[in-house]
Amino acid sequence: MADTILLAKGVTKRFDGLTAVHNVTYEVKAGETAGIIGPNGAGKSTFFNLLTGFFIPDEGQIFYLGEEITRTPSYERVNRGIVRTFQLVSVFDTMTVLENMMLSRIRQGRDYRSKRRFFFKSVYHPDLVDECLQALDTLGIADKADIKTSDLSYGEKRELEIVIALSLNPKVLLLDEPFAGLSPIEIGHISRVVQQLSGKFAILIVEHKISKLVELVERLCVLNEGTLVCSGTPGKVICDPQVRECYWGKEETA
Amino acid sequence: MLQTIFYGLTIGGILYIISIGLSLTFGAMGIVNFSHGLIYAIGAYTIYAVMAKMGINFILGAVIAVLVSIPFSYIIEKYVIRRLYGESIDYAIIATYAVLLIGVDAIKWIWGASPLPISDPVGISIQFLTMEMPLYRLIIIGLTLLILIGLSLFFKKTIIGKIIIAGLGDREAVRGLGIRLDKYFAIIFILGSALAALGGVLYSPISTLHPYMGFHILILCFAVVIVGGMGNLRGTAIAAFSLGLVMAITGRIWGPAAEAMVYVVMAFVLMIRPIET
């Protein structure tokens, strides 16, 4: 329990009689990079939404650093260090790349609090802008800081989303299908970013396809029809007969 | 014809002022807010009360009417709207409709059911080419333009505005940034309601006050919001002025069809608009 950062204990979530997540107990340890895979409709995103406070479980509890957060609102969980990205990339297309970054900093850093907090420009403290530009530079998109986000490619938007998530100082970062919709080159890029981040804080990745996760995660779990089927090292999970049946079995028959 | 266009712009301006709150409430919170019509009526009846009963002038009366509407909208937001976030849209319609009905009966109880007139507070007309234009209507158009520019700057330049615009695009993503979005929605709800009250104030001298005035304007504003796009600020402005002109021009040709034509335009827009999935 000592190094457990995030713990879901027997959580269940139902939607109009359909049980999306059933009695799942799962923990994320500090500093580990873990993955959850499962076929479409397995309940992965619902489980993510339960961990991040976007849904409240019907049964069970969620703990963060030993403290119960089952009913803590999503924004408060972010402020405590549970940061997420979304399956469909979520950046604000009508704003510039830098504005997207600054928006994530609005309620951060009391040092930057000025008396004129009414105007958006008041967030633009030179140090903070430099910090944001450096963060964009780590992914090679600093030169695009002043262009409209809608003009970025999907892969660049995904990178921006991750930069924004990192700027929120995560203690645990939850990535919801970070490779969905990306080209192989972009997938490689995002994978390298995740590898560089590994060990700095806990990372939990939900992904549809196992192949992309095997090299990235230390521990893999399989969710099927809302139930946790198997857990272990990627190598062990791949060989598990139950996983093959529920996961690859479906792909073979498709 | 020029006078018709001028009248259309006046109606369009008032429709814009009232519709903006309705559009934001739907776009940002996903709530169809019938109680908006009540706040509009509260604005109109308050200006009547302070002018007719207390002898206060129109400008000060307008300020009082807008201020009076704020606690009402605060209470509606806190005890009705806030409890409807994330709930089915049906609940929102029933709950806010109930608020409107309670408000209408309260108005009937206080002021009676008879229509009440408010005279033109300016009472001056300006000669332009061959026609006479009431200065009051010109003031309404000017004020609408000021509000339009002011709101545009507010949404572009302020922290609240940026968060609301972001929230209109993707509510979940804003929450994902650790921002307590419902607090900002509450601010914008009260701002939108204050504008509805101002709309009630401005419309009362060119119309008459009656307990069901909120219902009447609400249906027109729904048409504006549907044509302009829910939560679309620019679209709401264009739709309000366009439908105001449609009403005025149709009314000039055949009076009884003036409002019906608004719904014909709305139906046409719904038919040709691509369905969002």
Image: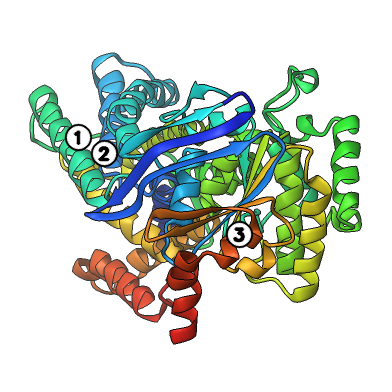
Which numbered circle lies on residue B99? 1
Question: Viewed as shown, does residue B253 lie left or right of B10?
Answer: left
Q: CA distance from mark 2 to mark 1?
A: 6 Å
As shown in the figure, which amino acid type bears the numbered disc 2? Ser
Q: Quadrant of the N terminus of chain B?
A: bottom left
Q: Quadrant of the C terminus of chain B?
A: bottom left
As shown in the figure, which amino acid type bears the numbered disc 1? Val
Contact (Cβ within 8 Å) of mark 2 with mark 1: yes
Reading the image, the residue beneath label 2 is B35
Question: Viewed as shown, does residue A226 lie left or right of A74?
Answer: left
Query: Residue A22, how many percent across, how many down?
Result: 34, 49
Which numbered circle lies on residue A169? none
Query: Residue B154, how many percent across, how many down?
Result: 62, 39
Reading the image, the residue beneath label 3 is A236
Closer to the eye: label 3 or 2: 3
Q: Is residue B132 visible?
A: no
Please identify the quarter of the rendering in which residue B21 is found: top left
Please identify the quarter of the rendering in which residue A127 is found: top right
Query: Residue B8, how many percent across, how many down?
Result: 41, 60
Tell which of A119 and B268 is nearer to you: A119
Q: CA distance from mark 3 to mark 1?
A: 60 Å
Query: Residue B256, how many percent across, how many down?
Result: 19, 67
As shown in the figure, which amino acid type bears the numbered disc 3? Lys
Question: Viewed as shown, does residue A134 lie left or right of A213?
Answer: right
Respond whether the residues carrying marks 3 and 1 are from the same subunit.
no
